[in-house]
Amino acid sequence: MATGAERESLEIPDPDASGNDDGSIEDDIAGPDGARMPLMGTEPLRTGLALAGLVVAAWAVMALGGVRYKAELLIAVARALVQLVAVALVIAWIFTHPQGAFVYLGVMLVVAAYTSNRRIGGDSRDRLGILLAIFLGASATVVIVTLTGALEFSAQTLLPFSAQMIGGAMTTASLAGLRLRDDVRDQMDTFGGYVALGATYQQAGREFAARASERSLFPTLDQTKSAGLVTLPGAFVGMLLGGATPLQAAQVQLLVLVGLLLAQVITALVTTRVISPLSPGMGHNVGLAEPTR
């Protein structure tokens, strides 16, 4: 994030004095060395034209290639448009009413837990466990970056950062939960052996939890190791387009990537230990009683 001195060095010129009268919104920001940096912005008309061109091109390629789901393409774009506009309006309101950020993040947590639990195929008790796992993972990261002063304690900074952590934790909860139940199903004889020796389902499931947690972290580990080499991560690109210096963009992206690692490690470990290792009906199919928790 920009320091106080860097903020004071930012010079946002008057659009009317820039001679930019072609209808585009392209302001300049002076970087620390005095060089002019573009602040990329796009007016709605130009954005709409670009989106229309992209959709038409994608639809045409699908048609020429004999790819189905052309209708789904249009539906997906329409949904994304409506959802993102709605989210933009909500976040704009939150920026002027910071207390609403906690409500919004609470809704995100509930939706994330519901989505992950549905993917895993869990019941209401599993959903509560997943909610706890996502909350612990995301909140631990947010607390650290806030207490160290890396990010300001404000809705403008904590809301997008927290949303990234919740989204990453949700994905990890789904991957870890699915892997746990897949491993138990594939090695049901081993699982049943632990139960026969007197272990509870949760205790028997812990034998599989560590491996499930490890596997769920592979995508984030790969993303972190290849950052900047294979692709430019989202936060980095967003800040560059917003006019930040490459160094500022790298700082924020590192916070996001390393923060996701912590959030997802916690989420994976908690998820694999609080949810039932058996999907509903799985125990009955192999002669085990359904879990009683």
Image (spheres, grey):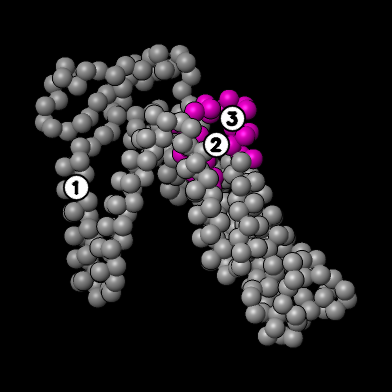
Label the magenta part by its dominant secondary structure.
Answer: helix
Element marked by disc 1: helix
Dividing the picture into quadrants, the one containing residue 68 is bottom left
**Which comes before the other along the chain, label 3 or label 1?**
1
Residue 29 image position (x, y, % from top left) = 31, 22
Mark linked to residue 146: 3
Residue 47 image position (x, y, % from top left) = 21, 44
Query: Foreground: 182 or 160?
Result: 160
User: For the view shown, which residue lies furthest in the right direction?
Assistant: 197
Residue 117 image position (x, y, % from top left) = 57, 63
Q: What is the distance, in whole Å, between disc 2 and disc 1 at their CAs? A: 33 Å
Query: Foreground: 274 or 11?
Result: 274
Q: Are marks 2 and 3 in contact (CB under 8 Å)?
A: no
Query: Foreground: 14 or 123?
Result: 123
Q: Is residue 37 visible?
A: yes
Residue 225 image position (x, y, % from top left) = 56, 47
Dividing the picture into quadrants, the one containing residue 42 is top left
**Label 3 sits on what residue type?**
Thr
In the picture, measured across the screen, residue 65 lies left or right of residue 125, that is: left
Mark linked to residue 62: none
Residue tagged 2: 255
Residue tagged 1: 48
In the picture, measured across the screen, residue 159 lies left or right of residue 148, that is: left
Label 1 crowding class (10 Å Cα cut-off): few <14, some 14-19, many 20+?
few
